[in-house]
Image (cartoon, grey):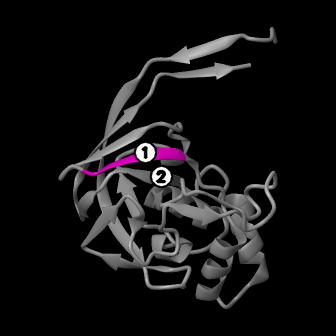
Amino acid sequence: MTQGLMFRHPARTLEARVDGLFAGAGPSFETEARNAVDLSFEGLANDRHGGHTRRTGGREPWYPRRTEIRNERQISIVARDELASIAADMELDRIEPEWVGANMSLSGVTRLSWLPPRTLLFFDGGVTLKVDGDNAPCRASGRSIARQFGDSPEIERGFVRHGRHRRGLVTWVEKPGRIELGARVELRLPEQWIYA
């Protein structure tokens, strides 16, 4: 392929619905269902992934572990159809958003995890979230799922393998406010180009 070859896709708009809201309860990895959540510029208060900044881990091998950086992972969003697909591949009856520490589940978007970075999510009520990128599946999520089925190490490792590109998205709060269960969401995908 010629260096510098570019493929372009125009900007577009999609629509979705909030079919689940979840918040953390202190240091626990798992989240609990809510009817509404209030977001600030720090994300969700008392949520494990809230805050203006966060500490690095295995996802950022270019920094020493626990280096403080900007928190682009404030809100984790999943799609139940993608979780169901992962569960089927793992031969489990289900995987719930709460088990993987999600803050929100959306319906109405095919391949939610493939939405590009910079996509803006505009919610009824005025909240705006900005997509940083897809959420790579981690062992902590796998352990949480495994606890539901008898602490199987195969499930823990299996989620990391089967969850790639179906684990949802991580976003940060661009405009704070309240999101309620059932809210309509307008997703504005930016113009995309692939540099090869």
The residue to which callout 1 is attached is 130
Specify whether 176 is left or right of 102: left
Quadrant for the C terminus, please.
top right
Q: Earlier in the sequence, mark 1 or mark 2?
A: 1
In the image, residue 97 sits, relative to residue 137, either above or below, namely below
Disc 2 on helix, strand or loop? Answer: strand
In the image, residue 122 sits, relative to residue 45, either above or below, namely above
Q: x, y percentage for residue 52?
A: 49, 61
Q: CA distance from mark 1 to mark 2?
A: 5 Å
- Residue shown at the point (48%, 73%) measured from the top left: 96
Per the rendered image, the range of residues in magenta is 127-132
Q: Are marks 1 and 2 in contact (CB under 8 Å)?
A: yes
What residue type is disc 2 on? Thr
What residue type is disc 1 on? Lys
- Residue shown at the point (48%, 66%) measured from the top left: 51
Overall secondary structure of the magenta stretch? strand
Specify whether 40 is left or right of 57: left
Examine the image and state in which quarter residue 188 appears: top left
The residue to which callout 2 is attached is 171
Q: x, y percentage for residue 180?
A: 22, 64
Specify whether 111 is left or right of 86: left
